[in-house]
Amino acid sequence: MKKFLKGALAASTILAGSVGALAADITIIHAGELLAKPGEAPKKNQTVVVEGGRVKEVRSGFANASDFGEGTKVVDLKDSFVMPGLMDMHVHIQMELGPNNDSEKLRLSKADVGMQSVGFARKTLMAGFTSVRDLGNEFTHLYALRDATAKGWVHGPRIIGGRMIAATGGHGDIDGMRHDLLEKYTSNTICDGADDCMKAVRKAVKYGADVIKITATGGVLSDTNTGTAQQMTDDEMKVIMDTAHGLGRKVAAHAHAAGGINAALRAGVDSIEHGTYADDESIRLFKENGAYMVPTLLAGETVVRMAKSGAIKSPDIRAKALRVGADLIENFAKVSKAGVKIAYGTDSGVSRHGTNAEEAVLMHQAGMKPMDILVTATVNAADLANMSDSLGTLEAGKYADIIATDGSPLKDIKELLDVDFVMKDGKVYKNK
Ligand SMILES: [Zn+2]
């Protein structure tokens, strides 16, 4: 065994050496305006040098290709605004709400769902979102999609794969079906009581979860009249956080009501998703434990629109959608102004995949400045994802995940709705 490992190591060292010798694997990007580090002012006329999928350096002025050896490729973005790829910390890439969801539940096989998600992943990448955190559905296909995009088998964003853990009858458990089907489809990520929840986290990590998602409170799209109050107990949440953290995983908590938000924050959660009814105590706890809020305003807007248009048939869901969707957007302004750290997240899957940038427009309408919004989708998201050493800014050594727009989103945030250039891992996926 040891011998084999040594051999494998030697082989990979040789391979790395030969790749280094190919100096021609360099792309230089001429950026008319470059926001290398969101939060700091952009600079005019810059060159980003990309080698082996990573940023090699950033230079002032437009460097000559000949400086980097024969075969150096040049990407001309002299008339564009260039910045790090956008990161969405809350998506569900295996689903998309629509009028046929009920029949699709019965018609689509798991393989169908897997194939459908390939298309959703592609749309997401083409919209300029080069990294996403998927907070869970069917995990084997999610992890397969994550690994397939990493290997380049399919075109999609870098995926941080989450596994959802919920309480029996709570948000995330199966609902809205007759009893025998409820039995059949009950997910194995349901847990009740501290020991059971500890085991659920351990199992999630065993099978490949990068992050744990819990449903601390009820949710809008559960077809139950259980409201949006705390559903997991304090003890359950505490053991989930401790177990996950011990295994090197962060925890994201879906939470609407203040009681559930605050209980999750006290238990040591890393991010609160939605955070609809965050109160003054929540704001204090957010700051105390350094957790992020992931607002998902787009989900709020989407469910309100669907409820008003009659697209939501269940009276229980419709009532919650109208109330919670509107409150979510309204409360965000208060929380962000209070200085709570925000990481960008849409809940795409509720909204259509590929429209992820609409969240930025809603954040702007809620009073957030464009630069602060770009920070949430880059620097902050990278921090929440535990990937600040490789994502979030364009600096030497980081992944070459780079996008460009015609105009500056700092002047008009709607520029993000039309991303013209997408590079991930140094490979160009879109250049129009
Ligand atoms: Zn979600």
Image (spheres, rainbow, N blue to C red):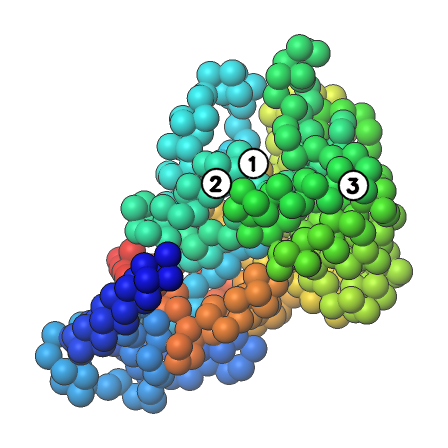
**Residue 184 higher or lower than 15, as above or below:** above
**222 relative to 240, above or below:** above
Which of the numbered marks, if any, corresponds to residue 195? 3
Q: CA distance from mark 1 to mark 3?
A: 23 Å
Residue 98 screen position, x and y as percent: 53, 28
- Identified at 36% across, 69% down, the residue is 400
The amino acid type, in three-letter code, at marker 3 is: Asp
Residue under label 1:
137
Query: Dot 3: what SS?
Result: helix
Q: Toward the viewer: 140 or 399?
A: 140
**Residue tagged by mark 2?**
142
- Label 1 crowd (10 A; few <14 / some 14-19 / many >=20): some
Amino acid type indicated by mark 1: Asn
> Mark 1 or 3 closer to N-term?
1
Question: Given contact means CB atoms under 8 Å apart, are the residues at marks 2 and 1 in contact?
Answer: yes
Residue 54 is drawn in which quadrant? bottom left
- The numbered dot on residue 364 is none
In front here: 244 or 68?
244
Q: What is the secondary structure assignment of the residue under circle 1?
A: loop
Q: Residues within 10 Å of mark 3 (few under 14, many from 20)?
A: few
- Residue 184 spot, x, y in % from top left: 62, 17
Query: Closer to the observer: label 1 or label 3?
Result: 3
Give the residue displayed 75% in from the left and 37% down from the top.
Answer: 196
Label 2 Cα neighbours within 10 Å, binned few <14 / some 14-19 / many ≥20: many
Residue drawn at the location 48% of the way across and 36% of the way down: 140
Locate residue 340 relative to residue 112 in the image: left or right. Answer: right
**Tag nearer the camera, 2 or 3:** 3
